[in-house]
Amino acid sequence: MAEASQIPMPVPAPRMSRVLDAAIDRGPALAAVAGLLLLWQGVVWFFEVPEYMAPSPVAVLGAFQDNAGTLWLNFWPTFLEAALGFVAGNLVAILLAVWFVHNSTAERAFFPIAVFVNTIPIIALAPILVLIFGNGFAPKIIIAGLICFFPTLVNMVRGLKAVSPATLDLMRVLSASNWEIFWKVRLQSSLPFLFAALKIASTTCVIGAIVAEWIGSNFGLGALIIEATFNFRSPLLYATVFTAALLAVVMFALVSFAEAKLIRWKSSDIH
Amino acid sequence: MAEASQIPMPVPAPRMSRVLDAAIDRGPALAAVAGLLLLWQGVVWFFEVPEYMAPSPVAVLGAFQDNAGTLWLNFWPTFLEAALGFVAGNLVAILLAVWFVHNSTAERAFFPIAVFVNTIPIIALAPILVLIFGNGFAPKIIIAGLICFFPTLVNMVRGLKAVSPATLDLMRVLSASNWEIFWKVRLQSSLPFLFAALKIASTTCVIGAIVAEWIGSNFGLGALIIEATFNFRSPLLYATVFTAALLAVVMFALVSFAEAKLIRWKSSDIH
Amino acid sequence: MEQHTAAGNPAATPDPGAIRVDHLDVTFAEGTVVALKDVSVEIPQGAFVTILGPSGCGKSTLMRAIADLVPAARGAIDVQGQSPRDARADRNFSYVFQDATLLPWRTALENVQLPLEVGGGGDAHADPRDLLELVGLKGRENALPYELSGGMRQRVAIARALVTKPKILLMDEPFGALDEITRDKLNEEVLRIWRETGTTILFVTHSIPEAAFLGQYVLMLAAHPGRVKEFMKVELPPERRLADRDTLEFVQITAHLRKLLEEC
Amino acid sequence: MEQHTAAGNPAATPDPGAIRVDHLDVTFAEGTVVALKDVSVEIPQGAFVTILGPSGCGKSTLMRAIADLVPAARGAIDVQGQSPRDARADRNFSYVFQDATLLPWRTALENVQLPLEVGGGGDAHADPRDLLELVGLKGRENALPYELSGGMRQRVAIARALVTKPKILLMDEPFGALDEITRDKLNEEVLRIWRETGTTILFVTHSIPEAAFLGQYVLMLAAHPGRVKEFMKVELPPERRLADRDTLEFVQITAHLRKLLEEC
Amino acid sequence: AGLKTVEMQLGWLASNGLLGEVVAQAKGFYEAEGLELKITPGGPNVDGVGSVAAGRAEVGQISSSPSVMLARAAGIPIKAFAAGYQKHPFTYFSLPGDPIRTPQDMIGKTIATQPTAHILLKALLAANDIPEDQVEIVNMGSDMNQLMTGQASAVTGWLTNVAAVDVLGEDRVDLMLWDTGIQLYATVYYATDETIAEEAESLAGFTRATARGWHYVRENPEEAVDLLVVAYPNMDREAELRAVEKVLEFVFTDATAESGWGTMNRENWETQIAAYADLGQFDGDAPAVNEVMTLEILEMTADARREVS
Ligand SMILES: Nc1ncnc2c1ncn2[C@@H]1O[C@H](COP(=O)(O)OP(=O)(O)OP(=O)(O)O)[C@@H](O)[C@H]1O
Ligand SMILES: Nc1ncnc2c1ncn2[C@@H]1O[C@H](COP(=O)(O)OP(=O)(O)OP(=O)(O)O)[C@@H](O)[C@H]1O
Ligand SMILES: Cc1ncc(C[n+]2csc(CCO)c2C)c(N)n1
Ligand SMILES: [Mg+2]
Ligand SMILES: [Mg+2]
């Protein structure tokens, strides 16, 4: 890395078929996944790890097959909770960030409280949430939302402030209202921060939905994880965890895709 | 907000005593905290909420007094786990981000895996961690680290890429190595992203330490939370949760302070 | 320090439409950097004032103070009977910044349209496409800033400033990045706009001929600290053509200005 | 299209130290924007070449192609017998960009020191403080870029380019933001440095007198698409003083250049 | 129509501790009592006591009897009114190579147990006059790894959790907590004082129907498991089929043969309270036995419960 002149030259890309492009793009990821699976299978075989400690990929695949129906059935509620929590949590975080950026007293007053609330373990909150919202979808969505909320708040506050003084001068001279500055400038320049936050949230909302199901649910991947854990159904446990992780990877990929579509400009100066 | 000309004029600050400054700075936060506490006490009184459901601030204060020793004793292990997890998790995330930014194949291969791993619920990982690392501090630090790891990775990757093309051109002409570009340019321009990530991590590492203690620990705030829940000692539960949240607020404040010290420059252009 | 008035007549009652700068100090870094010291100047309604001065003498700072982008440490500014803040809120200014300051996510055309979308939009306004054509960017309307050359970006910023037909136009080295031909063309355009609309124009330039050719008045600032060196009327006919630059009067004026600048 | 050689002699064997641009095309936006079309030029070792041309004609792009910042769509560039890439890796270039491109977290002095800290540092180098004094920034060494005026930032960038004593100096409108006095002073400094060090200099400017005064050769580019209009030797004595600009030969040359530019 | 809804809040996910209720639901036993039973799951961190105390649910089912005592001691006005498992299936599992057959075998050994079950081990040691420092207590989660890897000589779990037990193999050694003198109830049914006072009839109906359900399970274990798996499709039918016999051994004992399903013994509760009081588990004074449990509902339903058995 210490050698000079390794900066890749921006060569004009020959027009390849998009499909091929995409395949090459995913290639390393697929290779890495395949490699890890092989390694894992190898370790399990070599050390003769018993299945209840860590099942082999093959055993997990078997569990996927045996429990396809169960997994499918439990996937949907978790997906729903995660997706709605994602929307709700990020929306609230963005709105709060907008408020904080326009009102520094509000920021100073409520940011510490947001930090505080964020640290209260969900599980400690659970009994109260159950008391207030009962046992349906509502508390799960709230928990999933709560858990994505904070990173987005922090990033978005930072992002909305990441406007260059020169641009603010321009908007002042145009006598733009705070609302216009927000809409025409801050929002755009916060996008890199926002998308970083949404990427984080895309995985934490899944965690949130799962954790939320632990406060009492008969269905969903979280419930299945508890069931599998306490009944020593290791392959099912792993299959479930994988399903949840895949959900997160897909949501992450969707956010990355949206980012690539939305941020097409390049900054022309040092930021 | 839609009215024009509300952009605050940057008035040169009269030199006030620093103490007064600081007090005014904290004022809104203290007021908000006080307001919330009063509201809570009011609700508890007005609706005659029984203590076992939600203790009043006064009851929690009592619990703080009665259990000062216990809280103090259990504070330290959690603090240690959180702090070490914070350091470890962020360090690994930063190093990984550096690798990803310099090697896009690595990024494409391992970023999805990082997303994947991040979604695996701690509960599912815990048995394996305990199996490998035993029951001491190590698995707790690892879990606290794991839980702060991901937001920092995402933000840092984004931050290290947030260098303007013009600056990269400059460094190319200077025939700077990737390492030099990293050290002289990328690191600085990633600071806003990094500090946002560290703020997030400062609270999640505390959550991580607590969750880790739930998988089996006799000491620490997490263990105390379990103990208080199991024994229906609501005021102690709340006092413990508050202690944890305060720890997070303090860590958050430290990160904010470091940020203010380290980022003193202003961008002179649009970013 | 005496008041530098337009006609060199300190007793004249201030024109209600003028920009009046009164014993202005501007400082930075908590008073340690004095950018402007005791600057007083009175700019008549509808005047075209060019500002000359060595690099770093405070030309941009003076314009920024007038536009309410930088606070006065001492002294007062009066813009058409209002405070700079009110004048700004009323959208009396357009400002061409020294850096083009385009929004990188907007195309050339969208950047020119920005003033129409914010701050109430303004009543009278020019057609953004016509303005882009005026500055020679027809056909590049949809280019993003990073796809434009330095001079092109500056021209987009000029078009943006003209789109609202402002009462006061503050131009900070607008033509610095342009070749002489384009520059000459735009010089004539600016003069035409000024004559036709009665806009008050403050125009920072580093080119002495440009200052003399465009300016009805030249404001010369000196450095360390930034202060008024001279505020002089350019004794040339108001209707100027490029060829006038070869006249003896013109050369005399530029020679005088060059001498002054050397003293700064 | 014929080869534009230094002496106007297409048969001359290429000087091994020259920059040779050979039928160069540069395109952007997947070939839809043609910035340079079939550009061929040969720059002798140690020459001072000024580049003139209308805004957007490809001056910056040509410099960027030579400095290996933009790839050639067609054609070849040869820098002192090497590819641009190798020449860049060997730190043969210094580049003053059209925007100052300072690192906002570094003071003026630290920005000037940057080339000494990266890319191997280079052997021979000038004293950063002396260079800041040369460009008139003594006393502002510790100012951050946002605390400097536009011209001051540009001057820091010039000092930065000089600090490594490069073999080839690429200057993209370095003096655009400077007043005439400072500019004249720096013009003479650049000439002095060129004479004393034998540096090959490519210098983009919009000022025709500056192009004629500084350049041993003037490269005139035309627009749509960017191509060579003329590559001419300036028939003035190599030892030039500012006063030479009032000579008849000088005025004839600038008049010729102005006519050419108008045709572009 | 016209049915009174009774909500039962679990202290855990739905499990085979719920067989009787599921069967009674499916067979319409609750309807026959004019009730409609709604079962709300809890989870690893939701014991459900809050929901019951707040009146959100009328009936609670909690894993272990001490929770009721601890809640009562903390001022939560709930009382146990029936016991599902007459004996607590909490067991110390060890391997034949290093067996722990009696409490005395624990001396000098490392025992791994869940943090919340430390107190049970301490009670066990106290009841058997073994000083606490003679046994090393370490934490475990839900897995048996520490026993398998030799890090601990015994791990703990419920004997009814056949999947967990299977992991240890056929020849494992069991030491049931019940047999060491710590005699707790499991899957205890409780309600608030208020509900017991004002809705005794509903609770009695609930108890009668549940008792009938459990008897039906005893007669038709396979059908019962099928019903359970239909109601809670996440459960593993094979495992539950093997578990159901074990479960029935804990639900139906000599005591139930005499007094019917769900019976409780006041003396047993007193012993439990005393043991916990001795271990200093109550913040203030130990609760009185009548605050912790009531036989009222059992007495109201005594005939019916005996009848079905
Ligand atoms: N990254 C890019 N993408 C698309 N088009 C570009 C890009 N860079 C430059 N161009 C186009 O190439 C042409 C030449 O640009 P260049 O910057 O070389 O002009 P220039 O001669 O330096 O102009 P100026 O004097 O205004 O700086 C312009 O039309 C410009 O729009
Ligand atoms: N934000 C700031 N902080 C500190 N000093 C500043 C700041 N802005 C300007 N200055 C100083 O104020 C002085 C005047 O700056 P200004 O930008 O007005 O100069 P200028 O006349 O426009 O120069 P140029 O022709 O180079 O653009 C300079 O010495 C500059 O360093
Ligand atoms: C059991 C459990 N509880 C809480 C979290 C919380 N968590 C993980 S990441 C994150 C936010 C920042 O990414 C938060 C709040 C968890 N993972 N697992
Ligand atoms: Mg300026
Ligand atoms: Mg250019």
Image (spheres, coloured by chain):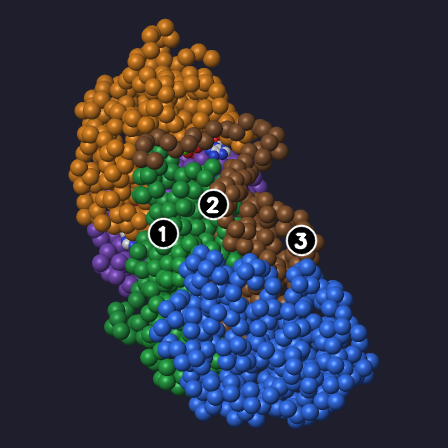
Chain colours: A brown, B green, C purple, D orange, E blue
- Residue E256's spot in the image, x, y percent? 67, 82
Residue under numbered circle 2: A47
Query: Does residue C2 sit above or below A41 in this rendering?
Result: below
Q: In this orientation, does residue E20 appear?
A: yes
Query: Does residue D130 sit above or below A217 in this rendering?
Result: above
- Residue in the image at 42% along x and 23% along y: D221
- Residue D3's spot in the image, x, y percent? 41, 12
Q: In this orientation, does residue A157 appear?
A: no
Quarter where residue A202 is shown? bottom right
Residue under numbered circle 1: B91
Q: Is residue D104 left or right of residue C179?
A: left
Residues at marks 1 and 2, CA–CA distance in whole angstroms: 31 Å
Query: Does residue D236 sit above or below C21 in this rendering?
Result: above
Quarter where residue D5 is shown? top left
**Are labels 3 and 1 assigned to the same chain?**
no
- Residue in the image at 63% along x and 47% along y: A62
Q: Amino acid at mark 1?
A: Leu
Q: Is mark 3 within 8 Å of ligand 3?
A: no
Q: Which chain letter matches label 3?
A: A
- Residue C174's spot in the image, x, y percent? 41, 42
Classify 10 Å Cα crowding around label 2: few (below 14), some (14-19), many (20 and above).
few
**Residue A67: mark in rendering:** 3
Q: Which chain letter matches label 1?
A: B
Residues at marks 3 and 1, CA–CA distance in whole angstroms: 39 Å
Classify 10 Å Cα crowding around label 3: few (below 14), some (14-19), many (20 and above).
some
Instruction: In the displayed orientation, state which residue is furthest to the top.
Output: D11
Q: Nearer the viewer, mark 3 or mark 1?
A: 3
The quadrant of the rendered image in which ligand 5 is seen is top left
Total numbered badges shown on the rendered structure: 3
Q: Nearer the viewer, mark 1 or mark 2?
A: 2
- Residue B39's spot in the image, x, y percent? 49, 83
